[in-house]
Image (cartoon, coloured by chain):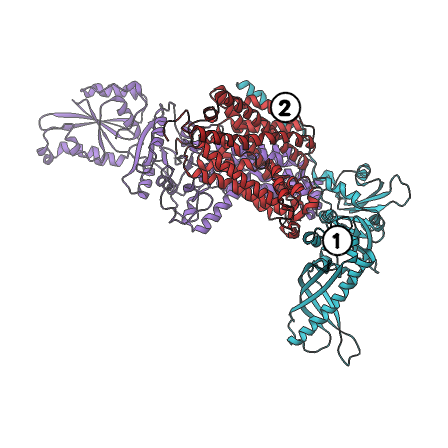
Chain colours: A cyan, B purple, C red
């Protein structure tokens, strides 16, 4: 019996030592930080997409600290193959932070690319999605003034914009979730370039129907959409305040501290009505008319003014969604589906949505006024 | 109680003769060419006739002043003094005990007992006309003063450690446990060395079967020489190839006494300051007397730290290798670029780097243990820093690797029980190799094998991994956390 | 205590841990998807009902086996049914245990190949796992039970992993509660039966418990209920995160659940899940393997059960290499599911009814 053990042990050792099949040393990998998907410039149908990857060059003596490679390809996985031929190391997508779609590519539909990302077990589910004005390859080549890699820069700046309730925060996993869920359509942050060179502006939202981009909304509409969705975090809001005998306009600014959105449905006369109540907590941060704001009656007036202003924004955004686009990006469909499954039609919800009666109600609570009177 | 003798069996049944001359010749023949065995004749002038007394002792093992003052002087004095000779007319083997001042007198009749006694430092007194001899205690030899044990120092607690003298050691235990149920049973083990071995236990707490088993095993040992507790440990242990020790060793009397009160058996060997504690469990390797001297919160936290140290010392290099070679996606993204840059300069794969650094640290450790005193410590510190720096500069190792190796080395030193560090080192290397071949799966498999091995290990019938497996609520009070002393008052009920 | 842990005996506490450990195995990975395909957002109610049902079965089993404390599996079945049927059932159980072990090993290998090691040949990994299983069982039941006891503490970490993605969950996905209808909820309980499988091993192991007392019934049922609670919470949180629509597209919801959040120190929690889950599955594998070896020892009357470990190991090794890919494996494992229903549901009820009819003590009774 002893001899058998010895032979077994030796053969086991040989097996173990003979190969390390999966060993991928860190320095032998090309770590991709950002992926960009565009439509290809030449009109060939063979390779309709242009895929770009942005990565740091690790080698100390390389002339550039980062590089981008692009290739025309049929799909994302096809691009993996073609890009590997250009690369000097094995490409690893397991640390991707940002996935950017060119505007045109987004209009054509993005779910075809998403499948390759979802199927790979190690592709990070928290990679941020973004749609950029123009082409993604241009965005990835930008060197932002404060960071080396535009991917990490955008990774942080999308987070910040979301915290100030200006742009949504969409990850691969969330997009897939909202795409598959019936009754809500996905939204993706939209990136534009500001007037100054090298400054990237994250403050708009791209609206999707299914997986196709249909519209981009800016500024207050983008914020309003986020408020409608209930993702109210921080951020300043300025509303006009009318004071008598003043020539310049006066403004009240509040700072959001979070909020809630409550959607209720009820059937009146066979018609479905949706009551959407939004309550926002805020603190007063500015009152340009240099008067005392330390008066509860006055604060109530402020609250009403701000609520009015917000409601106007919300209403106009909702009109865009209902009348112009006929697209439910807010998620009313999910509530209807829960409460009234017999009315909800999963295939044609967007059509139903456009005829729905939706009543908005906004309530702002100012809980603090700061330290001046 | 005469020690059970397992040696000198060729002289076992030979007795003394009544003639002093013959006895002397026999003993001189046995101790031929041992010039340190002294034969001292004393002639006593009794009232009527003279009596010859022979003292046999080993020079160097006896306390010379005591021998002179207490044994030889009264005998000589008896010859001269008229006072004493009024009461005692004739020296017999019974009344010589009234003359000689010795605290321990026993009667011996066989040659092997005489030889044993002479070689242990007692003095043998043979009186003409009697075929039994007297053994007088006169032990005294040069021995070390009581010092703090070097590898088991504590911040708070007593600073005395066991010495090489078995009597000192038993005395230190007696001073801590003043209870008559503390029994000290002495055996002689080793055919050539005849070493005294004392088995110490608390009669009313110890498990009788365990005790019987231990004594049977000890008396059945047939070996030439026992020099240190390690010999007995290796004979008594159940699994020779396990990296983990199956009995504790300690140099501290408070640790030994704490274990005695919990019902364990302590084995003290003459000539070595380390004593054995049987049986032991896995979590005892993480206990130090300081845990009990300090308050509950710190005792528990420090113990948790020790467990963390154990985990770090075994697994950290392999985790590093697994992350760098296999699971790059686990590294924080901000770190990857820097890590990659430093690794790109090193020509070796992470495995080779890890093993090289580990071997260097092992060499450093052994070297600093062998070199005398301060040089050893200096080499240890300087070597670690300088070699680490130089290795990074020469691109043989990456700085992360140096940090990993340093933390690993630190982690292995927090364990109070010194032998466990050997276990850690033994486990670390196969784990690195497995991690290098199979990544995280290799680490999983190595830990599984380790846990299965620990589960099947038992120390004298007591499962090694108690209280984790089998879960024993009594012992749990003292395993990872340490409950306040009120809850620990009773010895854990190990019969449950 | 000195003699109690001679190999072959387990304490009552170890038996509860064995029940919990053998139930939490490969089933947890795809449980939510499989059940929510039928029961939509009320899958967690299905799982809960299933768990309660199984705890009743467990009570039935313990109640039956309690009457024959000294009989082993073969003996009390041959007392209740007849001897030839008992031999048939035992040999069927041996085959079931061997196949189940091979399935478990193969599932574990699939997971490891997908998430950890992609290129390593399946044969090497399978060899290592089979050798681990042999090492675990060769020293007897006590060692296997102790191993699972040590693993029990890992389960606590497991449970904490559920809390990881809670910020991303949306409770609206769980509503309307009860909206799928009673029928689909009950139908949804059937595929979840496999995830709970393994508890019937107590039929084999009950006689080796060294300190049988009346509390065993209560605590065994409690073990099943605690596993039920754990599964229910897991399924509920996964539905809350994904929603029943997306859930049908996700193959391993338990792993994808952890992909939803960023982490400060380690980027990926999936690796932690894989590590702890692997330990649990290895524990399950050992128990299942040993039950087969133990019954073989009873039937063929050899001295040690370990001899059969060596015999079955190559067979299992071959079996693990047989399925071609994961869908193939899932198909094959559905047969195991049927056998599981037989041993877990039909056999205990049969034995219970027969024990009521037959009454009396077993063939090996010394004293109660």
**Residue B66 vs residue A44: left or right?**
left
Of the 4 image quadrants, the one containing the C terminus of chain B is top left
Residue at the (66%, 62%) spot, across then down: A258
Residue at the (55%, 24%) spot, across then down: C92
Identify the residue position indicated by label 2 in the image.
C318
Disc 2 and disc 1 on one polypeptide chain: no
Which secondary structure lies at badge 2?
A: helix
Mark 2 against mark 1, which lies toward the viewer?
2
**Local crowd at mark 2 within 10 Å, few (<14), some, or many (≥20)?**
few
- On what subunit does the disc labeled 2 rest? C
- On what subunit does the disc labeled 1 rest? A
Extreme residue toward the bottom, this view: A245
Q: Nearer the viewer, residue B7 or A326?
A: A326
Report which quarter residue B410 is drawn in: top right
Q: Is residue B359 visible?
A: no
**Residue B168 vs residue A177: left or right?**
left
Percent across and percent down for residue B126 are 20, 25
Percent across and percent down for residue A57 are 77, 44
User: Which numbered tag is attached to residue B303?
Assistant: none
Q: How far apart are the alpha carbons under marks 2 and 1?
A: 52 Å
Percent across and percent down for residue B213 are 36, 28
Percent across and percent down for residue C30 are 64, 39
Q: Nearer the viewer, residue B101 or B132?
A: B132
**Residue C116 vs residue B292: left or right?**
right
Q: Nearer the viewer, residue A322 or C21?
A: A322
Extreme residue toward the right, this view: A43
**CB atoms of marks 2 and 1 within 8 Å:** no
Identify the residue position indicated by label 1 in the image.
A153
Q: Is residue A372 visible?
A: yes
Of the 4 image quadrants, the one containing the N terminus of chain B is top left
Which secondary structure lies at badge 1?
A: helix
């Amino acid at each position: 019996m002893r001899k058998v053990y010895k032979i077994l042990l030796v053969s086991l050792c040989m097996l173990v030592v003979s190969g390390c099949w999966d060993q991928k040393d860190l320095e032998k990998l090309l770590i991709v930080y950002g992926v960009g998907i565009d439509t290809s410039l030449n009109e060939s149908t063979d390779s309709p997409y242009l895929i770009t990857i942005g990565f740091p060059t690790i080698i100390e003596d390389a002339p550039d600290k980062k590089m981008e490679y692009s290739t025309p390809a049929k799909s994302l996985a096809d691009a993996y193959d073609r890009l590997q031929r250009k690369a000097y190391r094995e490409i690893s997508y397991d640390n991707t932070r940002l996935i950017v779609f060119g505007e045109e590519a987004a209009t054509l539909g993005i779910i075809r690319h998403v499948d390759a990302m979802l199927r790979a077990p190690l592709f990070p589910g928290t990679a941020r999605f973004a749609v950029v004005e123009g082409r993604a390859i241009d965005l990835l080549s930008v060197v932002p003034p404060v960071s080396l890699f535009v991917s990490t820069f955008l990774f942080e700046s999308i987070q910040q914009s979301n915290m100030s309730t200006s742009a949504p925060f969409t990850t691969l996993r969330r997009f897939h979730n909202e795409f598959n869920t019936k009754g809500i359509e996905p939204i993706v942050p939209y990136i534009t370039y500001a007037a100054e060179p090298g400054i990237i502006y994250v403050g708009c939202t791209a609206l999707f129907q299914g997986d196709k981009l249909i519209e981009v909304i800016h500024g207050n509409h983008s914020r309003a959409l986020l408020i409608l969705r209930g993702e109210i975090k921080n951020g300043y809001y300025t509303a006009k305040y009318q004071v008598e005998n003043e020539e310049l306009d006066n403004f009240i600014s509040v700072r959001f501290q979070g909020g809630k959105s409550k959607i209720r449905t009820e059937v009146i006369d066979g018609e479905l009505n949706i009551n959407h109540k939004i309550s926002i907590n805020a603190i007063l941060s500015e009152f340009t008319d240099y008067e005392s704001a330390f008066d509860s009656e006055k604060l109530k007036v402020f609250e009403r003014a701000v609520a009015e202003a917000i409601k106007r924004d919300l209403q106009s955004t909702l009109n865009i969604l209902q009348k112009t686009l006929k697209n439910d990006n807010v998620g009313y469909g999910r509530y209807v589906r829960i409460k009234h499954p017999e009315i909800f039609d999963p295939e044609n919800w967007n059509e139903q949505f456009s005829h729905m009666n939706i009543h908005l109600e906004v309530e702002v609570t100012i809980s603090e006024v700061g330290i001046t009177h | 109680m005469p020690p059970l003798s397992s040696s000198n069996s060729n002289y076992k049944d030979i007795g003394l003769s009544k003639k002093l001359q013959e006895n002397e010749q026999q003993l001189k023949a046995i101790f031929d060419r041992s010039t340190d065995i002294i034969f001292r004749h004393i002639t006593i002038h009794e009232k009527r006739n003279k009596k010859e007394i022979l003292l046999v002792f080993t020079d160097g093992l006896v306390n010379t002043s005591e021998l002179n003052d207490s044994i030889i002087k009264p005998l000589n004095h008896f010859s001269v003094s008229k006072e004493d000779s009024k009461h005692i007319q004739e020296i017999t083997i019974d009344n010589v005990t009234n003359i000689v001042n010795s605290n321990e007198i026993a009667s011996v009749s066989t040659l092997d007992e005489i030889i044993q006694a002479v070689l242990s430092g007692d003095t043998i007194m043979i009186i003409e006309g009697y075929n039994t001899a007297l053994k007088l205690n006169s032990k005294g030899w040069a021995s070390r003063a009581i010092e703090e044990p070097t590898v088991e120092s504590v911040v708070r607690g007593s600073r005395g450690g066991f010495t090489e003298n078995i009597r000192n050691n038993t005395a230190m235990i007696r001073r801590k446990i003043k209870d008559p149920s503390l029994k000290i049973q002495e055996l002689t083990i080793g055919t050539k060395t005849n070493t005294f071995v004392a088995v110490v236990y608390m009669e009313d707490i110890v498990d009788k079967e365990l005790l019987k088993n231990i004594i049977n095993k000890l008396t059945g040992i047939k070996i030439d020489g026992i020099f240190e507790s390690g010999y007995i440990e290796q004979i008594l242990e159940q699994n020779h190839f396990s990296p983990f020790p199956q009995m504790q060793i300690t140099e501290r009397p408070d640790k030994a006494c704490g274990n005695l009160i919990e019902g364990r058996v302590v084995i003290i060997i003459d000539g070595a300051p380390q004593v054995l504690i049987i049986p032991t469990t896995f979590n005892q390797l993480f206990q130090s007397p300081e845990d009990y001297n300090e308050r509950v919160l710190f005792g528990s936290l420090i113990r948790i730290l020790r467990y963390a140290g154990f985990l770090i010392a075994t697994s950290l290099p392999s985790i590093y290798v697994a992350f760098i070679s296999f699971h790059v996606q686990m590294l924080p993204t901000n770190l990857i670029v820097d890590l990659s840059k430093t690794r790109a300069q090193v020509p070796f794969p992470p495995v080779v780097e890890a093993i090289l650094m580990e071997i260097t640290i092992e060499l450093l450790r052994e070297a600093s243990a062998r070199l005398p005193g301060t040089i050893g410590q200096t080499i240890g510190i300087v070597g670690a820093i300088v070699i680490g720096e130089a290795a990074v500069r020469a691109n043989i190792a990456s700085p992360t690797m140096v940090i990993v190796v340093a933390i690993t080395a630190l982690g292995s030193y927090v364990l109070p029980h010194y032998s466990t560090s050997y276990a850690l080192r033994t486990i670390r290397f196969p784990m690195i190799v497995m991690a290098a071949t199979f990544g995280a799966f290799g680490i999983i498999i190595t830990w599984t094998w380790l846990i299965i091995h620990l589960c099947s290990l038992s120390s004298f019938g007591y499962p090694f991994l108690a209280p984790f497996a089998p879960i024993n609520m009594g012992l749990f009070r003292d395993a990872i956390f340490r409950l306040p002393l009120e809850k620990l008052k009773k010895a854990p009920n190990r019969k449950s | 205590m000195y003699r109690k842990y001679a190999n072959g005996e387990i304490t009552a506490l170890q038996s509860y841990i064995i029940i919990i450990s053998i139930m939490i195995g490969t089933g947890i990975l795809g449980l939510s998807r499989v059940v929510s395909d039928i029961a939509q957002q009320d899958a967690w109610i299905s799982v809960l009902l299933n768990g309660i049902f199984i705890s009743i079965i467990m009570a039935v089993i313990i109640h039956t086996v309690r009457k024959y404390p000294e009989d082993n599996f073969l003996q009390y079945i041959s007392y209740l049914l007849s001897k030839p049927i008992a031999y048939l059932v035992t040999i069927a159980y041996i085959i079931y245990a061997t196949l189940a072990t091979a399935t478990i090993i193969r599932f574990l290998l699939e997971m490891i190949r997908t998430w950890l090691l992609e290129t390593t040949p399946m044969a090497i990994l399978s060899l290592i796992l089979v050798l681990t299983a042999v090492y675990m069982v060769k020293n007897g039941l006590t060692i296997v039970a102790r191993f699972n006891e040590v693993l029990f503490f890992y389960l606590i970490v497991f449970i904490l992993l559920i809390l990881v993605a809670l910020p991303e969950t949306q409770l609206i996905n769980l509503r309307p509660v009860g909206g799928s209808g009673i029928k689909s909820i009950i139908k949804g309980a059937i595929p979840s039966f496999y995830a709970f499988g393994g508890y019937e091993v107590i039929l084999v192991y009950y006689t080796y418990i060294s300190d049988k007392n009346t509390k065993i019934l209560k605590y065994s049922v409690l073990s099943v209920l605690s596993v039920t609670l754990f599964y229910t919470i897991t399924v509920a949180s996964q539905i809350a995160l994904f929603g029943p629509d997306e859930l049908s597209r996700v193959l391993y919801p338990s792993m994808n659940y952890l992909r939803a959040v960023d982490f400060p120190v380690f980027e990926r929690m999936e690796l932690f899940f894989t590590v702890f889950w692997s330990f649990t599955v290895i524990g399950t594998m050992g128990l299942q393997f040993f039950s087969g070896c133990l019954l073989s020892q009873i039937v063929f009357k050899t001295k040690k059960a370990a001899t059969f470990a060596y015999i079955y190991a190559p067979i299992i090794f071959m079996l693990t290499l047989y399925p071609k890919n994961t869908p193939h494996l899932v198909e094959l494992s559905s047969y195991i599911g049927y056998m599981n229903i037989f041993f877990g549901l039909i056999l205990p009820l049969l034995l219970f009814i027969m024990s009521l009819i037959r009454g009396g003590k077993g063939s090996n009774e010394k004293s109660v």
